[in-house]
Amino acid sequence: RIFVLGIGFFTLCFLMTSLGGQFSAKRLGDSPFTIRTEVMGALESRGVLRRMSDMLEMLMKRMDILARLENSTDFHKGDEARFPLDRFQPAAGLMERIQAIAQNVSDIAIKVDQILRNSLLNGKVVEGRRDQCEVPRDPKYPDCAGKVEWMRARWTSDPCYAFFGVDGTECSFLIYLSEVEWFCPPLPWRNRTAALPSPQPLPRVQAAFQSDLAHLLELIGTGKESLSFMKKRIRHLAQQWLRAARRLEQKLKGQQRDQKHILIHIGFLTEESGDVFSPRVLKGGPLGEMVQWADILAALFLLGHSLRVTVSLKELQSHLGVPPGRGNCPLTSPLPFDLIYTDYHGLQQMKQHMGLSFKKYRCRVRVIDTFGTEPAYNHEEYATLRGYRTNWGYWNLQPTQFMTMFPHTPDNSFMGFVSEELNKTERQFIKSNKVSSMAVVYGKEASIWKGKEKFLAILNKYMEIHGTVYYETQRPPEVPAFVKNHGLLPQHEFQQLLRKAKLFIGFGFPYEGPAPLEAIANGCVFLQARFNPPHSSLNHEFFRGKPTSREASLAEGERVSSQHPYAEDFIGKPHVWTVDYNNSEEFEAAIKTIVRTQVDPYLPYEYTCEGMLERIHAYIQHQDFCTASSPPLPPKAKSPAMQSPLSPLALSPNATHLVWSPSASRDPHTWPPVDSLQVWVSETQHACTETCRRQGLVCEPTFFRFLNKKEVFLQLSITCDSTEYEMNHLYPAVAENVHECYLQKEPLLFSCAGYNTKYRRLCPCRDYRKGQVALCRDCL
């Protein structure tokens, strides 16, 4: 009897739980992707209620039979009964409760039946809507079916899909793929209110030059030694920046400049990337990247743009509007920034967390890239096929979206940094207080000094040697006893040391840092080693894995032939001496000459505050990677009779090169202006960088699209027995020995860098402003 009662009670609990499950579903309209699943399952719900009612009725009958049986047997035994009558009082109470529940269930069944009858009036609409959730076959959306199939199998792999309302139904897949992503066509029955375009942005505010850097220092924040270093640098150069901003404001007087909303995400300082720089700021670690970022922040702020600065992944996600999850979904709203300045670490973080939005908005990104990224490494398919793939390349960005510390190659944009400028009084003071027998070694880490005893011994015969090597308690053993080591110096004290010294000497590392320019600006001669053979990714570990060859197969000006190629090529003697350190006689002769040579402080204009402001202003105003600049190229052409649009170029008066034709139209939005273009044909052993340099010009990759036509070969009297479109970073070019001409199939591969002795290349060259190689004469 107790067993029967227990089974009955357990059955009742189970049925009530089942009933609760049927009514615990979300209300209609709770989710924009719920297609009335409660109504569609209504018949099943009504059946459950009826079965519950029947089972409760049967349970009551069996309990009644059990009670009658008990009265006719056990209860007649009187005192002999094992179980007294009061032991069954709970059973009688249970009977009453079961009867009450059965009545309630019956009432509920009647009410549900009434609701179902009303809801069935809309059944045809519901069934029609379900039919419309079949995967559409629209040729404009060829990937729709495949994406729906992927969603069926993987929609639970990332919580972000549920965040956007995906619930496992076919309709939720289609709504997500048509309204959040864009792989499927819009569903005609959807209420389009939620999917309407975002409101039009507010009218643009005009950018105004700033005169106070205090707010910028607040934006940078605190908590890291690297941030403290950058803020100290900005404070130190504040007056220099402000004077330069006023001068540029006068130059640009009357020009309209829209204020840009700019996100600056310094990825290498985030904890997720390891942030190896911050702990080493006070221990002699590399500061070049932080110098450049500090100057970029100052320039963008003084130009009057609205900035947000982040050095953490969490802040980046918040500013971008990243949905919760693992980063497979697009952003929750349109990107609120016109431009994003970041580095390779930040670029990777953005790709991981922006989903499809990364592809949509990557044209707004500017990548601060110390050593540069060549087009052959940037194009993913080409890099994979030709062996150029590295850990840092294959982003398929426009190559000029990468911004370098020095103008290694015109394929990238030259961002740069600034060095401290001297006024007339300071210049005169330096000239009168120089110690001709004093040298400072370039190298704050003891490892740089290892194995340099021979050079130091020769130098010590003529000059007193000073070092700034970091140490904690004991003098580093790598530093000889005759060297006066000052330890790691604050920046202003290091500047004072340079103002006294005659020579600043490098031992081959670090590559291309800011310190040599600072030394030259303070009146020092910079002595550095010539690398033979030049260093590259093929023979030196430092360059291995970087998205740039910088190797002997490139033009002379692009390979790393010395510790600081910019100083060697763009400054040169008497300020910069590059010698073979393995030749003791050449090394000693150079030191003797330097001791006798008088030099004035020198700073290239492009490394002044005004030069950097000028350059960044021009980039922001004119570089637009989100608007297509030219129609797509033909897929392939093999016929000699291949047709293409007429060339806008004309032969120059001396018939040596091509220029923009006076009668050709000029797009006012083309930048640099086409009037600066000259087309030259390279020698087989020269890249376009060297070809343009020999004409007193610079290569301009933006102009390649005007050269990439068969008519250009004809205008230059080049015979083409065949002309083909192919992917090759050396094209357009001609193989003269076989009269084969090649045009570029992939615009992302247009490159000033590289040569092959088989080809003569068509090279787009332009003029440039004195001291400002990044800008043409009319580029402001």
Image (cartoon, grey):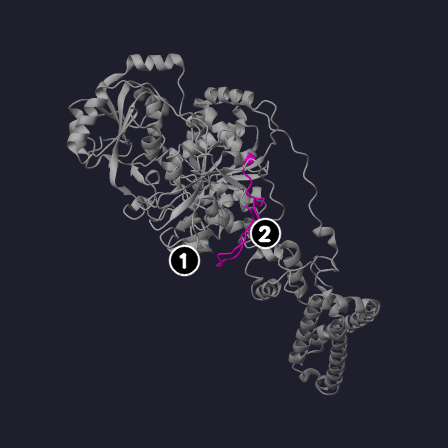
Whether residue 709 is visible, yes or no, is: no
The mark nearer the N terminus, 2 or 1, is: 2
Position of 155 with respect to 653 (left or right) is right
Q: Which mark is residue 399?
A: none
Where 125 falls versus 582 (above or below)? Answer: below
Q: Left of 632 or right of it: where is 765?
A: left
Please state the horizontal and vertical placement of residue 305, each as a whole percent of the image.
57, 31
Residue 512's image quarter?
top left
Residue 85 position within the rendered picture, expressed as x and y whole percent measured from the top left: 71, 78
Residue 337 percent coordinates (x, y): 58, 39
The three-letter amino acid code for the residue at tag 2 is Pro
Residue to which mark 2 is pinned? 330
Other-residue count near label 2 (Cα within 10 Å), few / some / many at <14 / 14–19 / ≥20: many
Q: Please name the residue shown 26% across and 24% down the image.
A: 503
Magenta span main SS: loop
Q: Residue at x 32, y 34 (%)?
A: 564
Q: Nearer the viewer, residue 548 or 691?
A: 691
Check contact, mark 2 vs mark 1: CB within 8 A.
no
Where is mark 1, residue-wise? 385
637 falls in the magenta region: yes
- Element at label 2: loop
